[in-house]
Amino acid sequence: MQMFNNFIADLGLREIDRIGARFTWTNRQASPTQSVLDRVLVSPEWDLRCHLASLRAITRIGSDHVPLLLSFADSPSIPL
């Protein structure tokens, strides 16, 4: 895990803030476990080019993961 964290730090990656659902995964049990498993990391160069990008969690249908929708200011949305 430390190697992964070092990799992210070495590349200067940052996570795009997500709006919408508080969690991105659930085990769908009566007493659910919920967690943020799905994230979008971007490089500093990408962030400069697409600084108006936004990430939105959309309604989950039939999956234990919440779909994420990446939107750019000048382009159509890209589902992830």
Image (cartoon, rainbow, N blue to C red):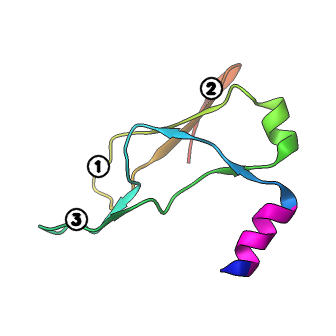
Q: Quadrant of residue 62?
A: bottom left
Q: Quadrant of residue 12?
A: bottom right
N-terminal-most mark, 1 or 2:
1
Q: Which residue is mark 1?
A: 61
Magenta portion: prevailing SS class: helix
Residue drawn at (33%, 62%) of the image: 64
Q: Which residue type does callout 3 highlight?
A: Arg
Residue drawn at (76%, 31%) of the image: 50
Q: Nearer the viewer, mark 3 or mark 2?
A: 3
Q: Which residue type does callout 2 highlight?
A: Pro
Q: Which residue is mark 3?
A: 28
Q: Find out whether the residues at labels 3 and 2 contact each other: C-beta distance under 8 Å.
A: no
N-terminal-most mark, 3 or 2:
3
Q: Secondary structure at mark 3?
A: loop
Q: Find out whether the residues at labels 1 and 2 contact each other: C-beta distance under 8 Å.
A: no
Outermost residue toward the top?
74
Residue 20: which numbered mark, if any?
A: none
Q: Which residues are magenta?
A: 3-10
Residue 67 falls within the magenta-colored stretch? no
Residue 76: which numbered mark, if any?
A: 2
Q: Is residue 71 placed above or below 9 in the rendered structure? A: above
